[in-house]
Amino acid sequence: GVLTESTAYTLPLAYAGTTGDVLASTDAGVLSWTTVSGGTSWQAVVTGTTQTAVAGNGYFINTTSNVCTLTLPSSPTIGDEVNVIDYAGTFDTNNLTVGRGGEKIHGASADLTVATERAGFCLVYTDGTQGWLLKDK
């Protein structure tokens, strides 16, 4: 068979405002530039003893020389995520403490101690009752 289409699209008159912008469309075929957000913004390797996490960020934590405390955001919004990876495989020797930042972790009003070598996990904020929960187990 033959496929024919007569849809008209209206293109934007200017270049995209930001590198990486994509074209979005209305149901009427009007196209415009938009910046796609989301995903994890991975940070440089953390080697210090304390770090304050920012929602949407991922952290490579290196505890080769010392323990580390990563404090979760104090005013999270439902759906906020924080990702963590044991950079050097030393959480079993020098533990990572995940500070609760005033919210609960797994429904408990206590910090989380991670002592598993090569641990990698994502915490997602749910609400004031459960607080931060593991995204994957």
Image (spheres, rainbow, N blue to C red):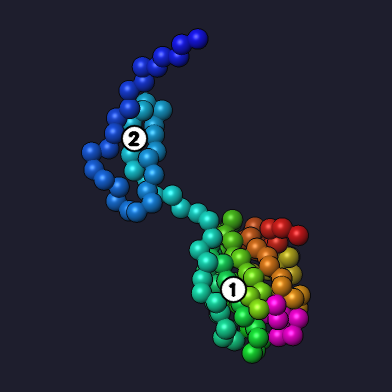
Q: Secondary structure at mark 2?
A: strand
- The foreground one among 85 and 113 is 85
Find disc 2 in the rendering and name its residue. 31
Rendering coords of residue 115 (x, y %): 75, 78
Q: Which mark is residue 14?
A: none
Q: Residue at x 70, y 77 (%)?
A: 89
Mark 2: few/some/many CA within 10 Å (<14, 14-19, 20+):
some
Residue to which mark 1 is pinned: 60
- Residue density around tag 1, few if under 14, some if 14–19, many if 20 or more, within 10 Å: some
Please say if 20 is above or below 81. above
Query: Farthest residue in the left direction?
Result: 13
Residue 49 vs residue 72, the one in the foreground: 49
Question: Does the rendering let one see residue 19?
Answer: yes
Point out the stretch of residues depicted in magenta: 89-96
Residue 65 location, quadrant? bottom right
- Point out the image quarter for the C terminus: bottom right
Q: Secondary structure at mark 1?
A: strand
Residue 66, located in which quarter of the rendered image?
bottom right
* Front residue of this view, candidates 20 and 79: 20
Task: Determine the residue located farthest toward the bottom in the rendered image.
Answer: 65
Amino acid type, label 2? Leu
Q: Residue 13 at x, y = what percent? A: 23, 38
1 or 2: mark nearer the eye: 1
- Vertical position of residue 102 compared to residue 1: above or below: below
Is residue 111 visible in the rendered image? The answer is: no
Q: Is residue 103 left or right of residue 27?
A: right
Vertical side of 83 occupied by 70: above or below: below
